[in-house]
Image: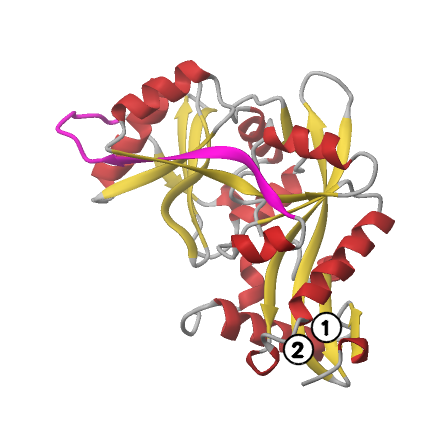
């Protein structure tokens, strides 16, 4: 068993180290071989340009663990208030070094780094809720997972699958602006949006009225969120529902699951739930406050929603 004091934490220094990192993540977090490189599923945090967000644990020269720490800005929608937070993801330990406290140590190190960077909360997604609760994390926010099955209703809204490269910067900007208005949300640039929509197995469907995009949905993200609509924009719940039925019918899907912010307008939630064939409620994520503004950030996160493309 290795001593925790022998572990060195740092960003990967070379393409070889990044390759070892991606191999560790593939073996630890995926059930089988991929038809694409692992880093292409996380283009903003595992690319060379995102190297500063990638933290590796080394014992001598061996990579034994990894986690991303991605600083993001949580912005209030009606004023100029903002809070800096950190998203954690791609957490993995080499199989030979599990159960020895290395991941606990890595998360502790990330919390220290995050405080030095001026971040006020850490956010992550994991099934290991008890493990992270013991480290100081707790559930934040709520989300609805609403499943819609094919109905006999004949709809055809004209929503079609599109490639992101066919969209202009102005169109991407209008799509971001058409997401549901919540009190707080994470800032995302159009360049980031374009890169995230290029993740393998990410399907974008767009509905136009003339040349203008009036609604859209995103389904899937690499190996995650298959048959799940995890980002969307629409002017009304009826339009969103009609788009979902059109996609189910046109692409012969059995059903689709829609992620809905728990803080969404309750009239929307009521109508969407009324039409769903299955309803589940879950925490949005797990969070840990940092520093003097930690609880303020946690309260803001509870009134926000972290969309699927931002989760890591």
Q: Mark 2, residues whose alpha carbon is within 10 Å: few (<14), some, or many (≥20)? A: many
| In-image side of 7 versus 211 (left or right) | right
Considering the whole magenta stretch, tell me its main secondary structure: strand
Residue drawn 67% across the image and 58% down it: 68
| In-image side of 285 versus 243 (left or right) | right
Is-magenta flag for residue 174? no
Residue drawn 52% across the image and 57% down it: 128
Q: Mark 1, residues whose alpha carbon is within 10 Å: few (<14), some, or many (≥20)? A: many
Q: Which of marks 1 and 2 is nearer the N terminus?
A: 1
Labelled disc at residue 255:
none
Q: In this view, does 229 lie above or below 60?
A: above
| Secondary structure under the numbered disc 1 in the rendered image | strand
Residue 196 lies, in percent from the top left, at 56, 48
Q: Distance between the residues labelled 1 and 2?
A: 6 Å
| Most distant residue in the right direction | 116
Q: Is residue 62 above or below residue 239?
A: below
| In-image side of 7 versus 77 (left or right) | right
Provide the residue span drawn in magenta. 137-156
Display colour scheme: secondary structure
Q: In this view, does 278 lie above or below 42?
A: above
For the question of whether residue 158 can be seen, the reply is: no
| Most distant residue in the top direction | 267
Residue 178 lies, in percent from the top left, at 53, 24
- The answer to whether mark 1 and mark 2 are in CB contact below 8 A is yes
Name the residue that disc number 1 marks. 57
Residue 305 lies, in percent from the top left, at 56, 33
Labelled disc at residue 64:
2
Residue drawn 67% across the image and 85% down it: 1
Is-magenta flag for residue 154? yes
| Secondary structure under the numbered disc 2 in the rendered image | strand
Quarter residue 110 falls in: bottom right
| In-image side of 227 versus 299 (left or right) | left
């Amino acid at each position: 068993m290795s001593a925790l004091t022998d572990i060195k934490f740092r960003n990967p220094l070379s393409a070889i180290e990044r390759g070892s990192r991606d191999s560790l993540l593939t073996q630890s977090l995926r059930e089988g071989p991929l038809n694409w490189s692992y880093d292409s599923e996380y283009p903003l945090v595992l690319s060379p340009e995102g190297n500063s967000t990638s933290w590796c644990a080394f014992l001598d020269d061996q990579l034994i663990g990894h986690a991303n720490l991605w600083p993001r800005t949580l912005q209030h929608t009606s004023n100029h208030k903002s809070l800096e937070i950190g998203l954690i993801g791609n957490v993995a330990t080499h199989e030979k070094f599990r159960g020895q406290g290395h991941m606990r140590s890595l998360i502790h190190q990330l919390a220290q780094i995050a405080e030095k960077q001026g971040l006020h909360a850490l956010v992550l997604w994991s099934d290991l809720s008890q493990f992270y609760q013991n480290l100081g994390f707790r559930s934040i926010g709520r989300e609805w997972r609403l499943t819609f099955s094919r109905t006999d209703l004949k709809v055809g809204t004209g929503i079609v699958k599109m490639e992101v490269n066919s969209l202009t910067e102005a169109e991407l900007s209008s799509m971001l602006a058409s997401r549901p208005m919540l009190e707080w949300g994470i800032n995302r640039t159009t360049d980031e949006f374009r890169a995230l929509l290029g993740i393998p197995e990410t399907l974008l469907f767009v509905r136009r009225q003339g040349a203008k995009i009036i609604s859209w949905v995103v389904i899937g993200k690499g190996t995650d969120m298959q048959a799940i609509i995890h980002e969307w924009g629409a002017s009304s719940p009826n339009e969103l529902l009609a788009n979902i039925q059109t996609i189910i019918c046109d692409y012969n899907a059995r059903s689709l699951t829609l992620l809905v912010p728990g803080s969404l307008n309750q009239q929307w939630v009521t109508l969407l739930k009324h039409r769903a064939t299955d309803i589940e409620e879950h925490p949005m994520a797990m969070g840990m406050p940092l520093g003097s503004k930690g609880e303020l950030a946690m309260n803001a996160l509870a009134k926000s929603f972290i969309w699927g493309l931002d989760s890591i």
